Amino acid sequence: MAELTLVQAVNAALARAMQEDARVLVLGEDVGRDGGVFRATDGLIARFGGDRVLDTPLAELGIVGLSVGLAAQGMRPVAEIQFSGFIYPTLDQMVNHASRLRTRTRGRLTCPMVLRAPNGGGIHAPEHHSESVEAMFAGIPGLRVVIPSSPAKAYGLLLAAIRDPDPVVFLEPTRAYRAVKEKVEDDGRALPLDRSFVLREGSDLTIVAWGGMVRDALASADALAAEGVAAEVIDLATLKPLDRATILKSVARTGRCLILQEAALTGGFGAEVAACLAGEGLTSLLAPVERVAGYDTVMPLPRLEHHYLPGSPRILAAAHRVLEYR
Amino acid sequence: MASGAKDEAGPGGAGRATEPGGWSAAFPQLRFLAPGGIMADAAPAGARHGERLIALHRAMTLTRCFDTKAIALQRTGRLGTYASSLGQEAVAVGVASAMRPEDVLLPSFREHGAQLWRGVASYELFLYWGGDERGSDFAGPRQDFPVSIPVASHAPHSAGVALAFKLRGEKRAAVCILGDGATSKGDFYEAINFAGIWRLPALFVIANNQWAISVPRAAQTAAQTLAQKAVAAGIAAEQVDGNDVISVADATERALARARAGEGPTLIEAVTYRLSDHTTADDASRYRDDAEVSRHWAEEPLLRLRQYLAAQGLWSSDQEEALLAQCTAEIAAAADRYLATSPEPPEAMFDHLHAALPPSLAAQRDAALAEARNLQENPGRIDG
């Protein structure tokens, strides 16, 4: 079993999916000989050829529009957008076509495509490279939004996303790309979509996180354990459709919930989790739900980035407020 | 100009042109059948094939009958907002007539004639424009795309469909029809650019009807023709008289033959005219002179073909009357069937969203059903 980084796990999943299904194509800017700007598609063109690994012109809207056409014809395109800040031109295609082709035609035409992109900051990248865009896509009916938190999750969830008969937005946490290595068995086994994962059990506090914030959640849980607090950590993995049952079940035991999100606070996906608890978990709650999030500011350039990203001081302070509320 | 009114000239200065851009000598301009039913000597042999011409005439007549009925239904509150294709029938019918069944059509929202030719039922078109998704679940051309309402957004799909054909080695073509306004959007340019670099079996037909709602062709782009936009993408292009169904079909046939031979994509600018309002929700008299519309009636596509057929002794006024009666009856029957079709049950909103309903949506589906049942049992009552 190989020790892989998250980006290597993405690469392994792409290769596995292409090997097992000739309909799977990878397309995007610089995904061919260059292997992608993060090297997620490294080596694929040598192995599968230029008819299955397509270097496209620089046209994000077109890449996704092309994918819709390919998918409607029964192909399985996996489109890469280089950086999250360049994903906005694809929204028209994702909202107006990818997400609703099945609905519009009553199942006659479908759109089994994956839109892959890095998501979030933390790697001192230039402007427009560090945005967190998950809530934007999670608000679109007909789309699945999946965010892996680790190499193994990336491998299993990406395989599931590619095999899914409907469009999936697969957002890879930029700062987790090379942060850790993990044993990943390249056995072609997918992880389930539409399900969240309890990564650590605990009875005092539920910490809900996704993507790059999951490692912060686990680190915070470690710090809290040293104080004698048992925190449960839930990795949402699939944001849309949301696995409400796993959140509600956990908070029914802990009574206290902290939500971590890298994106700006207002209108972020954490609000949906909080609303779920307010609507269906109110009687379980022993304390107000807290969200630790990015500020409602423009994502700063690298010199201020560490002030923006919610780190352990903010997380632990919020955890203590939630734990101490009586 | 009324006192206090603002200068409407815009940044381009006074004299905003409202007349269409000229016919450019830079592109082959194809016109075999001129107004008055005059056939050019250069017309291809197929252009004089009586049976084929009658089939084209029938299809354009059926399209116009559909149009008339759709507008009548809308005006009497029995159809939603509808985009008429009056005056543009030759573009839609001409293009579709040159396609093969295994090709894929990606229409904009004014190509009823192409859809009908391809085997979409007029009943299905009524359903769609009447607000029912089942109208896009075509029983006939199963792989054709539904109409694209967001302008030009279907152009990149055509490149994707054509790429799938090419990768699988299939001798099929993707045919995208879009309007003059669509050529101002990046989607259009990205699509023809993709098609060019990969030499895709794709055809882009610009139905240049001179108006994008209220914006005339000359205010859409300073380019002398829309066909010339293909030059930047390095693909073949030509301009045809879009009111001459024979030219449209001929140019399409040649483009599709090239596509199937692996010779790459083509852009056809079919110059036509929108005789109708933009849609039934529009009032073109707010921005367009009646005199301009009247002038263009003399060039409309149905009359010239009928005149030619009559002059050749291929078509009589009795045959014309019989055709009109037949088309009217066919469309009326389709409309009756549409009007007699009950809406889908509310769960249809959920049941086609994903291949399988995610568990998290089950509660919303149940709620929609409960609300529908409640409304049925207690009509007129609004409660929880």
Image (cartoon, coloured by chain):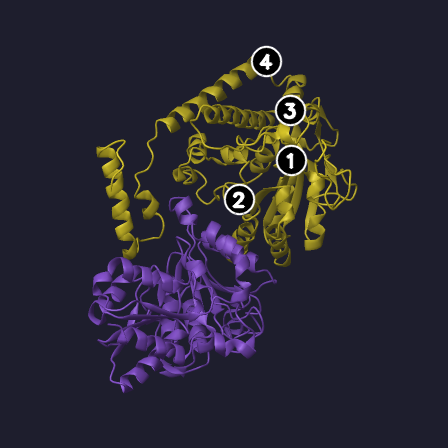
Q: Tag count in the figure?
A: 4
Reading the image, the residue beneath label 4 is: B317
Image chain in yellow: B
Same chain under badges 1 and 4? The reply is yes
Q: CA distance from mark 3 to mark 2?
A: 26 Å
**On the rendered image, what quadrant is the C terminus of chain B found in?**
top left
Q: Chain of mark 1?
A: B
Q: CA distance from mark 3 to mark 1?
A: 19 Å
When asked about the image quadrant of residue B139, the answer is top left
Query: Residue type at mark 1?
Result: Asn
| Circle nearer the N terminus (3, 2) | 2
Q: CA distance from mark 1 to mark 2?
A: 18 Å
Same chain under badges 1 and 2? The reply is yes
Asked if the residues shown at circle 3 and circle 2 are in contact, with their CB atoms under 8 angstroms apart, the answer is no
Residue B296: x %, y % from top left: 69, 26
Reading the image, the residue beneath label 1 is: B209
Reading the image, the residue beneath label 2 is: B106
- Foreground residue, B285 or A193? B285
Residue A325: x %, y % from top left: 27, 73
Question: Measured along the vertical axis of the image, is residue B116 above or below residue A81?
Answer: above
Q: CA distance from mark 3 to mark 4?
A: 13 Å
When asked about the image quadrant of residue B212, the answer is top right
Q: Chain of mark 4?
A: B
Image chain in purple: A
Q: Chain of mark 2?
A: B
Which residue is at the far top? B318
Frontmost of labels 3 and 2 is 2
Answer with left or right where residue A61 lies relative to residue A217.
right
When asked about the image quadrant of residue A54, the answer is bottom right
| Circle nearer the N terminus (4, 2) | 2
